[in-house]
Structures are given as C-alpha cells and as structure tokens.
C-alpha cells in the first residue's frame, strides 16, 4: 500500500515538477528550449516569469502574453525543424538574479524551405522566486545578417498587440 | 499487487514523458508546422448547475488573425492560457462557433478565467498522464 501511495504521489508530482520553473538556471533555459521543440506550450510557458520581456530580432514583446501570441508559435515551429547545438555557455549573477549566455549552432530548414546554418546568440536573465528560477528576459540575435533582416521585417510588420497589453 | 504494478507502469510512463519533454536539443527530424490561432476572452459563458464554467466568448488576436473563427474549426484542438489565473493551464476544445468556445470537461472547468485573458489554440492532441 505504501508503494502504491508513493507511486500515486509521483504521478501527481511529475507534471507539477515540470510546470514550476527549475532549481538551476541553466535547467530552466534548457527545459524551455526542449518544451519548444516538443511543442509543449504549457511546458515552455512554465519556465517563464509573468514579468517576461523578450527582445528578438529587433522587436520587443513586452509581456509573456505578447510573446505567447506573436512569436512563441514561430519559435516552436522553428525549434521543431532545426537542430540547436549548444556551443558555448557562461553563467553568472548571484542570489535571486542570474544570467545565462549561450551560443547555439542552428541548422536545418525554415518553414518556408530556406536553409539555416547560423549561430544564434542568446542572453537569458532569470529570477528566483521561492526555490525555483524562471526566465524574465530573453534576447536573441544571429550572425546571419540576411536572416536577421528577414525576421526583423516579418516581426515589425505584424499587427498591434491585443487590448490587454495596452492597459 | 496488480494495482501496484499498473501504478508503477503509469508512474514510469509519466516520468519518461516528463524526461522526454525536458531533453535538450538534439538531432531534429522535420516536423510539420502546426496550425495555431490566438485569442482573447471577451465574455464568460454561463456556469453549469455546479457553478463550473466550460464556455466563453472570444475574439481572435495575434499575427494574421482574421475577425472570427470558423465554426468547429478548433474542435479537438489544444487550448493553453497565456495569462491570468489559469496561466499555463491546458484544455481541449469541444466545439466552437465564430465567437464562442466550449471546452471538454476532461481537463476540469475554466473557473478563474477572466475577460482579456489570452490563449493559444493549437491543432495538437493533449497527452494526459493517465492515458
């Protein structure tokens, strides 16, 4: 009976553990990317702080809702069809504020069929609440000027944010 | 003993699923692009006899959003809230009209959802631990 109770507790705890951030900053970053790749929207969101601000290819997503509506879908699609190889990583900060700087070699094809072979640069700032870190800021850019320009053009031409963001 | 074995198998499956979701980037196979539609709650539906909410009115928001949904376009889709009290909570769409969305009771009621809450509807199947 004790084993059964333990297993039930494990079953209940497994999704909760995934959904609450991470104890180690780099884990939060890696879990976010893994969730994107698995098209696990809730899993990706669960690594994000409610105060998230994203700078991505020259465009600002000022809230987690804005990122979730406008650019996370695109990021999930790209993550699913490309390979991201971690090349370098530095971590720092102290206490409840940490940073993780990573570079990835990204290869594959865009959803429009164009080949990708570039280095993506990622700055992540994390904040600890309780025992768990969540991501409060992303900044992505690339060494591929053409890709950067294409993405920046697409993103700046998108529609205005929803009403809730204007409050 | 039989129940214990089944629970063990279920727990193992849940842990494997969680582990898979947490794995880092590896060799990617081509994955089809998923249809997604963003939305924002404009009005809550009427609660059922128990006071639980399974329906709300919404408008499309997000990149390239048309004015209204196609009837039952979202049927079976996964719906994830991007903000509000139900942030990261996931539901399955039972049906929709051009402006009203009803979710299945499989993931519980929508209680706590509020006007202006944003969500993302995706043409994806929900993987439930118990399955």
Image (spheres, rainbow, N blue to C red):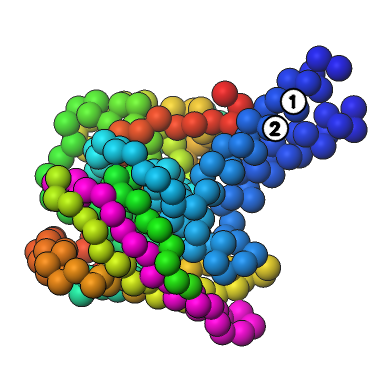
Task: Name the residue beneath numbered marker 2.
Answer: B11
Quadrant of the frame with the N terminus of chain A: top right
Q: Is residue B3 above or below residue B42?
A: above
Report if the CB atoms under discs 1 and 2 are less than 8 Å apart. Answer: yes
Residue for point 81% across, 15% down: B2
The residue most toward the top is B2
Q: Residues within 10 Å of mark 1 (few under 14, many from 20)?
A: many
- Residue A117, compared with residue B16, is above or below; it is below
Residue B105's spot in the image, x, y percent?
49, 28
Please state the horizontal and vertical placement of residue A110, each as a whole percent of the image: 20, 50
- Which numbered disc covers residue B73? none
* Highlighted range, magenta: A90-112
Is residue A152 found left or right of A100 in the rendered image?
Answer: left
Q: Which residue is mark 1?
A: B7
Q: Could you tell me residue B44's position as x and y percent?
A: 36, 43
Q: Is residue A123 left or right of residue A9?
A: left
| CA–CA distance in space, label 1 to label 2 | 6 Å
Residue B3: x percent and y percent? 79, 18
Q: Residue furthest right?
A: A2
Quadrant containing the C terminus of chain A in the rendered view: bottom left
Residue at x 64%, y 83% (from the top left corner): A95
Q: Is residue B16 left or right of residue A101?
A: right
Q: Secondary structure at mark 2?
A: helix
* Most frequent secondary structure within the magenta stretch: strand
- Most foreground residue, B114 or A13: A13
């Amino acid at each position: 009976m004790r084993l059964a109770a333990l297993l039930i507790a494990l079953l209940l705890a497994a999704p909760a553990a995934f959904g609450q951030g991470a104890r180690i900053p780099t884990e939060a970053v890696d879990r976010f990317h893994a969730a994107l790749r698995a098209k696990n929207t809730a899993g990706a969101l669960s690594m994000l702080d409610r105060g998230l601000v994203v700078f991505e290819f020259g465009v600002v997503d000022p809230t987690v809702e804005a990122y979730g509506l406008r650019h996370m879908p695109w990021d999930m699609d790209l993550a699913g069809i490309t390979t991201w190889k971690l090349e370098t990583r530095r971590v720092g900060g102290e206490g409840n504020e940490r940073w993780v700087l990573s570079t990835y070699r990204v290869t594959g094809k865009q959803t429009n069929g164009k080949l990708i072979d570039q280095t993506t640069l990622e700055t992540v700032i994390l904040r600890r609440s309780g025992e768990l870190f969540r991501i409060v800021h992303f900044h992505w850019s690339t060494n591929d000027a053409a890709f950067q320009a294409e993405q920046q053009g697409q993103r700046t031409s998108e529609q205005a944010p929803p009403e809730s963001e204007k409050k | 003993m039989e129940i214990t074995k089944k629970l063990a198998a279920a727990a193992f499956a849940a842990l494997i699923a969680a582990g898979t979701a947490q794995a880092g980037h590896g060799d990617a196979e081509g994955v089809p692009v998923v249809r997604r539609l963003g939305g924002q709650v404009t009005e809550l539906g009427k609660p059922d006899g128990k006071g639980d909410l399974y329906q709300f009115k919404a408008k499309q928001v997000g990149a390239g959003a048309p004015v209204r949904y196609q009837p039952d376009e979202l049927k079976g889709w996964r719906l994830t809230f991007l903000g509000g009290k139900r942030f990261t909570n996931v539901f399955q769409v039972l049906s929709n009209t051009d402006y009203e969305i009803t979710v299945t009771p499989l993931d519980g009621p929508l209680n706590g959802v509020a006007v202006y809450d944003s969500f993302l509807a995706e043409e994806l199947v929900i993987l439930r631990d118990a399955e």
